[in-house]
Amino acid sequence: MTTSEAKTHRRARSITVALFSALCGGVSAAAFAFVAPEGSSPLVPTTDEKQGQHVENTTFTQANYGDCVNWKPGADGVNSNFATVDCEQPHRFEVSSREDLGQYPTSEFGPTAKQPDLKRQEELTNELCNGPTMQYLKGRLDPEGRYSISPILPPQSAWNDGDRTMLCGVMVPDATGRTTETTGFAAKQDQSRFFEKDRCVRVDGNLTNEVPCEEKHAWQVTSVVNLGEQFPGEWPNPEKQNEFLNKVCTKAAQDYLGGDDALYNSTLTPFWNTLKRQSWDAGSRIVNCALTFGRPGGGFATLNGDVRHDFTIDGNPPKTPPKRNPLRREARSSENASPAPEAAPDATTAPAPAAAP
């Protein structure tokens, strides 16, 4: 390894570790305040001929252990068409248990009681949902992944009529906390929380959320990497992950912006996330490579715009970085090849741009 390459490795890794410390608390959180759609009604099972999909319309109370359910979100916040579906089809919730709050050993959920508020729902999740759900998943839940343990409550009208069913299960929340559609049983999925290439990501405390690139964000994704392809066996410690991702993500950043000079002049830094052991043990393997700008004191600067076009860093265009001397790779020769011209420079991996000019 050359001196320049060594500096590149140490510098990119130190910046990445410093920036990623902002996410060490995890990137997902439990979501609450979900109620079943109004108008749920028991109907004869039907088949959607267009999709070739069997859909059983059912009441909220009939959904049970191992069922996957879906509904149609309403723009006004009122959902409709609650139905059980095959778990290989798009769904918004996977049921791990069904609880009857009417059997709760207090009068808290009596005939005239209001639905529990967010704080109480969180407490009920800890008391009634976490254990059965972890057992249902056979322990395979990535605490930093995209799935969250959550309850859903009956429609308001059903609650008013005395239905005290609470469904426990897992869902994938979006940036606003609403459920998104997913496919397959959660325990069989790669639960990694990652974003597709070209997406821009905002960091809110310990949460990462996709946003339009025209809005304020912290990083932009350059590639999606499956660590399982490089490490097919046991969990690779952070040192091994960083060593591998330093090369992969620096190359991805160069390709994304159109070369090493473009990366240097952007003043942006290649960035990646790593997987903790508990995530690996839950089956998560996917991480992101991205571009960001590290503030001198640590943390992310605020980006606006697509980094491949016009963008700003904390509201200002990127500053012009200092000129650098061209780097050369030692010319290689063999008996059957002519030696390279002595003065001809060749491309090589340049040091990653400084966190701040």
Image (cartoon, rainbow, N blue to C red):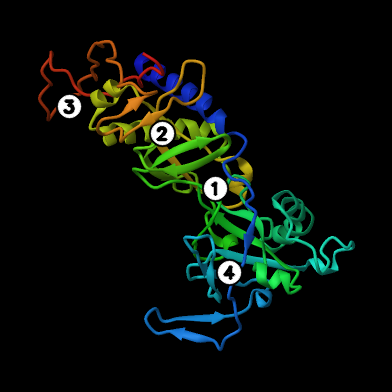
The three-letter amino acid code for the residue at tag 4 is Pro
Q: Residue at x 46, y 19 (%)?
A: 295
Report the quarter where the N terminus lies: top left
First in sequence: mark 2 or mark 1?
2
Q: Name the mark on residue 216.
A: 2
Lateral position of residue 175 relative to residue 121, left or right: left
| Label 2 crowd bin: few (<14), some (14–19), many (20+), radius 10 Å | many
Mark 4, residue position: 37
> Relative to 56, is 114 above or below?
above
Which residue is drawn at the image coordinates 51% and 40% (left, top)? 208
Residue extending farthest bottom: 44
Foreground disc of the pair 2, 1 = 2
Q: Position of residue 326 (x, y in %)?
A: 22, 14
The residue singled out by tag 1 in the image is 233
Amino acid found under the numbered disc labelled 3: Ser
Q: Amino acid at mark 2?
A: Lys
Q: Which numbered disc, 2 or 3, marks the residue that appears first in the sequence? A: 2
201, 349: nearer the viewer: 201
Q: Which residue is mark 3?
A: 334
Spatial separation of the CA atoms under disc 2 and disc 1: 38 Å
Q: Earlier in the sequence, mark 3 or mark 1?
A: 1
